[in-house]
């Protein structure tokens, strides 16, 4: 990765199809203007089964994201979920990505960088979008629903 780039944008491929360009511009602008080391997009879902929950302290500051399969029963009650669209300060990302360890389920959780940034006292920004703009896809039924929604969206834009 070249040092000339100041920011890294990461979008989870399975969940990113419904973002509009304004959301992407907004998270980039918020990240750059705030001087955050890490920014991400979240939304609120009434039924957040299978989705990573945004953890906040009593002051409302983000302290991490917990994947559903690792969440406690209390954490599973949280309605704010991670949408999988991140912007990182590139030097901070390069330095800290190596610190992400393999989880108990055998995965590397990019979301671990959120808790790491919080522990380091770094600035974290969150853009909360409407639940109609983001659709998590973790099950066959969610895939079918997303397919239907995308077909409607594409037909509407013709």
Image (spheres, grey):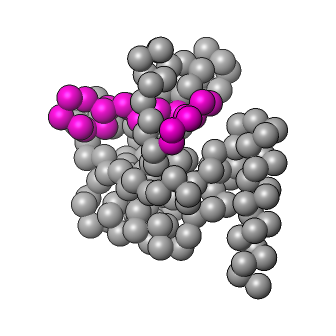
Of the 4 image quadrants, the one containing the N terminus is: bottom right
Q: Is residue 104 above or below residue 90?
A: above
Residue at 54% x, 28% y is 67
Residue 39, above or below 137? below
Image spot of residue 57 (x, y percent): 25, 29
Q: Is residue 123 above or below residue 72?
A: below
Give the main secondary structure, helix, strand or loop, of the magenta stretch: loop
Q: Residue at x 53, y 47 (%)?
A: 83
Most foreground residue, 9 or 83: 83
**Residue 127 visible from this viewpoint:** yes
Q: Is residue 56 magenta?
A: yes
Front residue of 43 and 114: 43
User: Where is the C terminus found, in terms of image quarters?
Assistant: bottom right
Number of marks in picture: 0
Measured from the top left, where is residue 32 in percent x and y?
A: 32, 65
Q: Residue furthest toward the left?
A: 59
Q: From the top left corner, tell me how far across and down residue 61 is, in percent.
A: 25, 38
Residue at the extreme bottom of the image, as rendered: 158
Would you place residue 123 above or below residue 155 in this image?
above
**In front here: 13 or 101?**
13
Q: Residue at x 70, y 49 (%)?
A: 14
Regarding residue 113, the answer to whether it shows in the image is no
Outermost residue to the front: 46
Picture coordinates of residue 100, whole percent (x, y): 50, 29
Examine the image and state in which quarter residue 28 appears.
Answer: bottom left
- Using the rendered view, name the quadrant where residue 69 is placed: top right
Could you tell me which residue is drawn at 56 percent across and 35 percent down? Answer: 47
Residue range highlighted in magenta? 45-64
In reply to whether residue 24 is colored magenta, the answer given is no
């Amino acid at each position: 990765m070249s040092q000339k780039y100041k920011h890294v944008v990461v979008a989870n491929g399975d969940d990113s199809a419904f973002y509009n360009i304004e959301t992407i511009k907004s998270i980039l602008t918020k990240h750059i203007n705030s001087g955050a080391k890490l920014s991400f997009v979240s939304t609120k879902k009434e039924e957040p089964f299978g989705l990573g929950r945004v953890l906040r302290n009593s002051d409302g500051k983000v302290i991490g994201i917990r994947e559903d399969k690792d969440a406690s029963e209390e954490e599973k009650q949280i309605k704010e979920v991670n949408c999988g669209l991140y912007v990182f300060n590139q030097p901070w990302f390069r330095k800290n990505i190596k610190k992400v360890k393999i989880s108990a389920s055998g995965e590397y959780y990019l979301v671990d960088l959120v808790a790491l940034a919080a522990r380091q006292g770094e600035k974290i920004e969150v853009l909360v979008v409407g639940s109609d703009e983001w659709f998590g896809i973790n099950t066959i039924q969610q895939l079918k629903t997303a397919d239907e929604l995308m077909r409607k969206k594409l037909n509407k834009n013709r």
